Amino acid sequence: MNKNELVNLAFKAMENAYVPYSHYRVGACVLCKDGRTFYGANIENASYGLANCAERSAIFSAYSNGVRKEDIEALAIVSEGKTIAAPCGACRQVLCELIGFDTPIYLANREAETTTSIRELLPMAFTNEDL
Ligand SMILES: O=c1ccn([C@H]2C[C@H](O)[C@@H](CO)O2)c(=O)[nH]1
Ligand SMILES: [Zn+2]
């Protein structure tokens, strides 16, 4: 599967966003090396701080199905906003532990896309090697 196909799957996942408060839809899709894909969307709550971001939904779905870091080929995260949104701080920390430092992360909106990685998004990360 190429980058565009994975980004399109993330847009498909975005349709399932539950966003009655922010009205800001985000979608994500994890691609495994064996071709399996796992969707995620942002899921909000009346207790606002309990919102789960799309990228965490997707990576937790993958892990919940037995996927581990070394099985993951790439992650796409898309939003419907005017800008290309990058993961929030909480997601950077979670992804840092659950995908490879150099695993490609494709970020996109309807107009543009870019490629990044945890190495770029979270320099000087606190990891399990610090414990
Ligand atoms: O990278 C991001 C940034 C924000 N959100 C969600 C959280 C909330 O539902 C909405 C507005 O912050 O967007 C994500 O899913 N991923
Ligand atoms: Zn987040």
Image (tube, grey):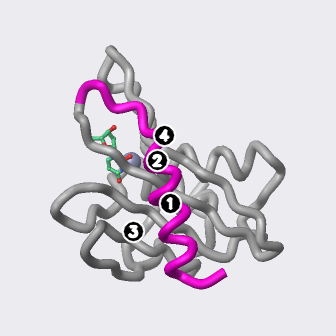
Within 8 Å of ligand 1, the CB of disc 2? yes
Badge 3 amino acid: Leu
79 w.r.t. 6: above or below: above
Helix, strand or loop status at disc 4 = loop
Mark 4 surroundings within 10 Å by alpha-carbon count, few (fewer than 14), some (14 through 19), many (20 or more): some
Q: Quadrant of the C terminus?
A: bottom right
48 w.r.t. 27: above or below: above
Observer-side mark, 4 or 2, equals 4
What is the span of residues highlighted in magenta in the rendered image? 1-21
Determine which residue is flagged by label 1. 10
Q: Residue 70, can we see it?
A: no
Q: Which numbered disc, 3 or 4, marks the residue that appears first in the sequence? A: 4
User: Quick check: which quadrant has ligand 1?
Assistant: top left
Instruction: Kindly identify the residue that appears in the image at 44 percent across and 33 percent down.
Output: 43
Q: How many marks?
A: 4
Res 54 label: 2
Residue 44, image x, y percentages: 38, 28
Res 16 label: 4
- Residue 71 appears in which quarter of the rendering? bottom right
Report, in whole angstroms, how far the alpha carbon at label 2 lies from the one at label 3: 18 Å
Image check: 42 left or right of 98? Answer: left
Res 122 label: 3
